[in-house]
Amino acid sequence: MNNRELFLQHVAQTSSAPIGLEITKAKGIHLWDSSEKKYVDLISGFSVCNIGHSHPAVVKAVQEQAAEYMHLIVYGEFVESPQVQYAKLLTDHLPASLNCVYFTNSGAEATEGAMKLAKRITGRSKMIAFHNAYHGSTQGALSVMGGEYWRNAFRPLLPDILHFNYDDDVVIESIDSSVACVILETVQAESGITVPRKEWLQAIRKKCDEHCVLLIFDEIQAGFGRTGTLWAFEQFDVVPDVLLLGKALGGGMPLGAFIADKKLMSTLTYDPVLGHITTFGGHPVSCAAGKAAFEVLLTEGKLSTIKEKEKILQEQLNHTAIVEKRSHGLWMSLQFQDNTMNQKIVHRCVQNGLITDWFLFAPDRLRIAPPLIITHEELDTVCEMIHKSICEVCDVRS
Ligand code: PLP
């Protein structure tokens, strides 16, 4: 059996139609498969590789840390310099109230930790979440996920979860002193990129303050410059009580985090002691890689150019088959008439050397989220290639 056959046989599958390419090398914005065919990565590993693949500074940090030490002991016992230094760097770039970092293994585990924190602090269990939200696949995170189809097979899940429409004022009245937390993505990803109204987020913040409800922002996909600012919440003049990070946080290594004020976070240290524990969370190699990647993002990420790059996508991606374009920063969705047409375009893009995909709650939308380091010229070429792929599928010249 070749590797692809072994993959289908022995590696647990999440769908009946995986992309199934065997990638042998990844560098910058490019991937190469086993036949040495080159692809432009338009997904960035789902917003992981914001500074591109295998940046030399990240590779060096991984190699050096692995040579010093890897896992030593469960999270929170020893002083591990990569964790400490990364927590300091992150909190230096966050508002003063987000000053204490709990490192986890993944985004889902960050969601779980934040949900537990909200219960522990408020003594309440009711949580407010939103339709079309994705916060992870573990059972707590799944409980606040916004799609009945995805949740139903795994019931019973957590009780007392209320789901509302995103960016709809109806939710405001329901935030009262029976609620532990409101959890939302600052910009919703898997609905095909939905940017909420500033007034909506501000009204939620106000109601949460009035009733001592924790406001949790999930920026696992939206963070680290994807929307044009380091953190998406900066654009709404709202600061959450808890910030969830993941994906680009580890610079390509597995890492998640929930970040809050030290006073809130200390509730996890008593009654019960060890309120949230993990063996590998904040792994020193992941933290060293994440810190190196974050430093590269700050120095070479050119976040000020993201809006110009968004404009290139908005202006150059035109075709009569595109029903709607939505974007926020270097993060775009193109809607087509139905899922089938979109699937064909995704496949054609792959054939033409572009890795792209659809959205979980919007399978009729094409995902465009290249590494942030992509140049203007590379974007011009990408737009031509996407246009060509759309023309080949839709058989329409425009
Ligand atoms: N939250 C958001 C917005 C995500 O996009 C994801 C993953 O796609 C998660 C949470 C879960 O992260 P992980 O897959 O690392 O558990």
Image (cartoon, helix red, strand yellow):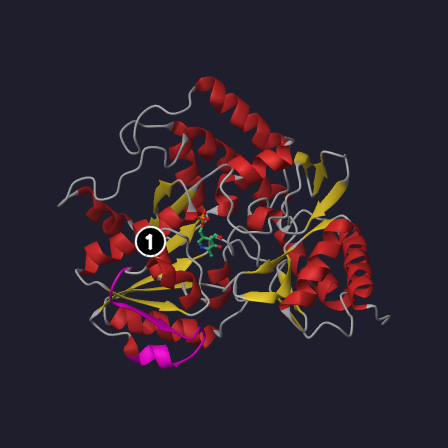
Q: Which residue sits at x=57%, y=59%?
A: 227
User: Cβ(mark 1) to ligand 1 < 8 Å?
Assistant: no
**Left or right: where does residue 141 sit relative to residue 42?**
left
**Left or right: where does residue 46 sit relative to residue 263?**
right
**In which quarter of the view is residue 342 placed?**
bottom right
Q: Position of residue 29 (x, y in %)?
A: 69, 43
Image quadrant containing the C terminus? bottom right
Nearest to the observer: residue 113 or residue 235: 113
Magenta stretch, residue numbers? 157-173
Nearest to the observer: residue 8 or residue 198: 8
Q: Which residue sits at x=33%, y=53%?
A: 139
**Left or right: where does residue 379 sit relative to residue 169?**
right
Q: Is residue 335 above or below residue 97?
A: below
The answer, for residue 177, to whether it is visible in the render is yes
The answer, for residue 252, to whether it is visible in the render is no
Q: Which residue sits at x=72%, y=72%?
A: 322
**Left or right: where does residue 111 sit relative to residue 40?**
left
Q: Is residue 2 above or below residue 309?
A: above
Nearest to the observer: residue 231 or residue 70: 70
Circle 1 sits in a helix, a strand or a loop, which is it?
Answer: helix
- Amino acid type at mark 1: Gln
Residue placed under numbered mark 1 in the picture: 139
Q: Position of residue 309 (x, y in %)?
A: 70, 58
Q: Is residue 390 above or below residue 86?
A: below
Q: Tag 1: Cα neighbours inside 10 Å, few (<14), some, or many (≥20)?
A: some
Question: Outermost residue toward the top?
Answer: 67
Residue 384 part of the magenta segment: no
Residue 168 part of the magenta segment: yes
Q: Position of residue 356 (x, y in %)?
A: 66, 54
Q: Position of residue 100 (x, y in %)?
A: 33, 45
Image quadrant containing the N terminus? top right
Q: Which residue sits at x=25%, y=43%?
A: 276
